[in-house]
């Protein structure tokens, strides 16, 4: 398979973001698909923790939070203090690992959260 690179000017990137509502659009392999088809979605994969993936979605509700996905299990945790927003019972066993990861990576979460906020998002950027 041939690969190629397209370079955009800063002006083009700003214009594209404006047309897309300010969202960051990422192309990621669908994690639950056997076919591994590529899809355009509005989320950013922040990191991996022992088989779990950490995501931030572009157009979210309060409070600012991140998502942990482990296979079919999902959980959401606040960015400011890592308090559980909602999580499948199975993920509660991993909370200690999530909390440990959060302590080291809170700044990274804030950076991803702020970078993926669309202009019209009801939940704005996190001010440090």
Image (cartoon, rainbow, N blue to C red):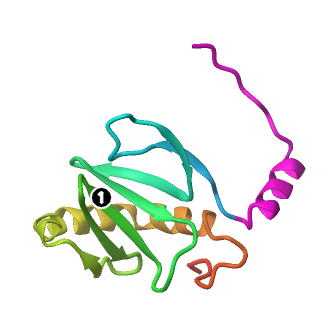
Circle 1 sits in a helix, a strand or a loop, which is it? strand
Frontmost residue, 66 versus 110: 66
Displayed quadrant of residue 86: bottom left
Determine whether 122 is above or below 34 in the image: below
Instruction: Give percent across and percent down for residue 43.
Output: 51, 58
How many marks overall?
1
Instruction: Say which quadrant the C terminus sits in.
Output: bottom right
Residue at x 42% of width, y 59% of height? 55
x and y percentages locating residue 121 in the rendered image: 64, 79
Of all residues shown, which one is farthest toward the top? 1
Is 3 above or below relative to 71?
above
For image coordinates 38% across by 61% down, the residue present is: 105
Q: Residue 62 vs residue 7: left or right?
A: left
Q: Is residue 22 above or below residue 35?
A: below
In reply to whether residue 68 is colored magenta, the answer given is no
Q: Residue at x 62, y 53 (%)?
A: 25
Residue range (magenta)? 1-22
Quarter residue 29 falls in: top left
- Mark 1 surroundings: few (<14), some (14-19) or many (≥20) residues within 10 A: many
Q: Which residue is mark 1?
A: 69
Residue 50: x and y in percent read 21, 48
Is residue 15 part of the magenta span, yes or no?
yes
With 64 as the anchor, is 5 left or right in this view?
A: right
Residue at horizontal 13%, vertical 72%?
89
Picture quadrant where residue 104 is located: bottom left
Residue 60, position in %: x, y? 52, 76
In the current view of this chain or complex, which residue is farthest to the right? 11
Q: Nearer the viewer, residue 35 or 74?
A: 35
Quadrant location, the N terminus: top right
């Amino acid at each position: 398979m041939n690969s190629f690179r397209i370079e955009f000017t800063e002006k083009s990137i700003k214009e594209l973001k404006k047309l897309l509502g300010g969202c960051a659009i990422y192309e990621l392999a669908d994690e639950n698909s056997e076919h591994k088809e590529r899809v355009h979605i509005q989320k950013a994969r922040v990191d991996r923790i022992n088989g779990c993936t950490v995501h931030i979605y572009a157009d979210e509700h309060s409070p600012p939070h991140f998502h942990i996905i482990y296979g079919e299990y999902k959980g959401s945790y606040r960015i400011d203090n890592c308090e559980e927003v909602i999580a499948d019972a199975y993920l509660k066993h991993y909370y200690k690992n999530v909390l440990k990861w959060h302590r080291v990576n809170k700044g990274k979460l804030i950076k991803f959260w702020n970078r993926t906020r669309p202009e019209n998002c009801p939940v704005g950027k996190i001010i440090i």
